[in-house]
Image: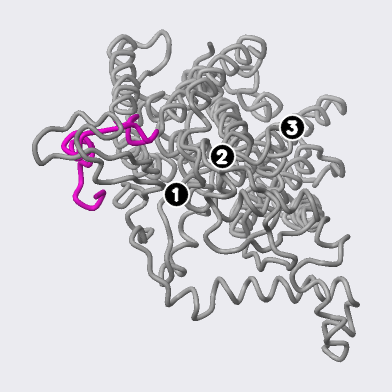
Amino acid sequence: MADVQVSPDSEAEQALDEPAVSATPRRLIPLPRLRRSVEQPQLSTIERLRDGQEQLRDRLGSWIITLAITALAFVLRFVNLGYPKNLVFDETYYAKDGWTLWKYGFEKQWPDKINDKVVAGQTDIYLNQPEFVVHPPLGKWLIGLGEQWFGMNSFGWRFLPLIFGTLLVLITIRMARRLSRSTLIGAIAGILLTFDGLAFVMSRIALLDIFQAFFLVAAVTAVLVDRDYYRGWLADQLEARGIPDFGGRFGPVRWWRPWRVVAGVMFGLAMGCKWNSIFVLAAIGVLGVFWDVGARRLAGSDWQAWWAALIDGGLAFAKLVLIGVLVYVLTWWGWLTTSGGWDRDWAAKHPDDPLAIHLGSMWGSFVRFHLDIYNFHTGDYIKNQTHPYDAHPIGWLVMARPIGIDAVNGIQPGADGCPATGQDTCLRVISAMGTPVLWWMAFIALLAAFVWWIAGRDWRFGVPIVAAMATYLPWFPNADRPVFFFYAICIIPFTVTLLAMMLGLILGPADGPHRRRGAIIVGVAVALVALNFAYIYPVLTDQLLVYRDWLSRMWLRSWI
């Protein structure tokens, strides 16, 4: 597996993008060793545009490693997937919504207190009227797909979350590898995510967030591939013309950038799961445009490189935003092409409303439905709600308040095999908690990576920081309503990537004098995460525990 390497850009681009260090390829090494060496030979502009991409040529080996780690994640998540058989937490909404979506194209209402009947196999007891839903339908379509394959049962509604939770590990490996230029660092990120308790639990319950997390990481990965694609294309243009740089000219325009199209599709699918994906689209989209400006400056466009903000930025808007919106609308296809969904006939009932007049029956109703959803998320009703597992975002990164997904408390000695004695009792719980050692190390890595990004001017660390903050910071203005720790599933793929890259700094280059010591530190860190995951495994999987054994896993009072 290749060491972590990247080639810095010209001094003109460094202010936007690269660290001001030697122009030769460099490894991820500790900050004190990042010094310019006048003895090292300069790389050409074309070589710098290639930006260490030669380190990504171990494709076969990298895919073997990726698939091996992904297979491990799948097996861990697959074991006893259908247990417990009841609808846990918000599965009561999404499993039933997915079932009626596949039957009618829109969500129908179900009577209250019928979950036991649904679990017993009565799947035709929904009402003949639409359900008001507050999230887009794509995640529910995917949950329902598993139900079409395996039936309306716990295995069926959890099967697609299992698949996408496993794919989240795969795409995180590829993202981390692309960023670090190292298959080893990608593998470390994948192993860490495999043993994260939150990612594990979210892969085994029928909620929407695991789908959103996968599509967001896939979108960010596609933008990263596009960065390499575009810079490689500029290098090809210089080579084809036989010139060292553009000599102050803007240069040719690349109209077709397939990876930006892929990113637009992925962002659209992420928004089709949950709306807040739009913040990541905005942040990463802007970052990508700055990369274009930097690439043009490196290619010798000088001040004209800023035209990229208009030209390449406009093309990026079309590929990311317009395609993303189109894909998002298509996720509503069932609602659009049927007549029974919530608000579907709103425009027909309000023909004098400006939405009906200017947009017509279907699109006027569509916009009105979205306004209703927005008002739900921002209105007084949701702000006046309370929940025992409400967790302010300020504590998410250190896992101050994980959430209970399912619990059976007070199991008496002898009942259900409870081995307790005396006054002690047993319980079964599913806690959506991260692996504590992992989350705390990832938080420290996030802070250290921010310093490295700013002080070391290393663009690679900025990508997961920007993506993580774009999924995290927008929750603060909404903290006046109940919010939950499990929303952080969209954060952890980026923070484990940062942790893996910081461990890469500790590991150092293959021929470095401290490689052995670094390898021991990295090995111990990964082993601690795996052991900590094994220790909390019973509270992730509804296993029978004596109360004192459960309490020994609740390290903070706020976890109880």
Q: Residue at x 61, y 34 (%)?
A: 159
Quarter of the figure with residue 429: top left
Q: Residue at x 87, y 44 (%)?
A: 255
Q: Secondary structure at mark 2?
A: helix
Identify the mark at residue 229; answer none if there is no mark.
Answer: 3
Cα distance, mark 1 to mark 2?
Answer: 42 Å
The amino acid marked with disc number 3 is Tyr
Most foreground residue, 236 or 432 = 432
Most foreground residue, 405 or 499 = 405
Quarter of the figure with residue 427: top left
Q: Is residue 171 left or right of residue 359?
A: left
Residue 149, image x, y percentages = 72, 33
In front: label 3 or label 2 = 3
Label 1 sits on residue: 486
- In the image, is residue 507 above or below residue 295? above
Identify the mark at residue 161; answer none if there is no mark.
Answer: none
Q: Secondary structure at mark 3?
A: helix
Most foreground residue, 36 or 25 = 25
Q: Residue at x 80, y 47 (%)?
A: 250
The magenta-colored residue range is 536-560
Disc on the earlier residue, 1 or 2: 2
Q: How is the protein colored in the picture? A: one colour
Check disc 2: other Cα within 10 Å, few if <14, some if 14-19, many if 20+: some
Check disc 1: other Cα within 10 Å, few if <14, some if 14-19, many if 20+: many
Residue 378, image x, y percentages = 54, 75
Label 2 sits on residue: 11
Residue 314 appears anywhere in the view: no
Instruction: Tell me if residue 553 is in the magenta stretch.
Output: yes
Residue 81, image x, y percentages = 52, 30
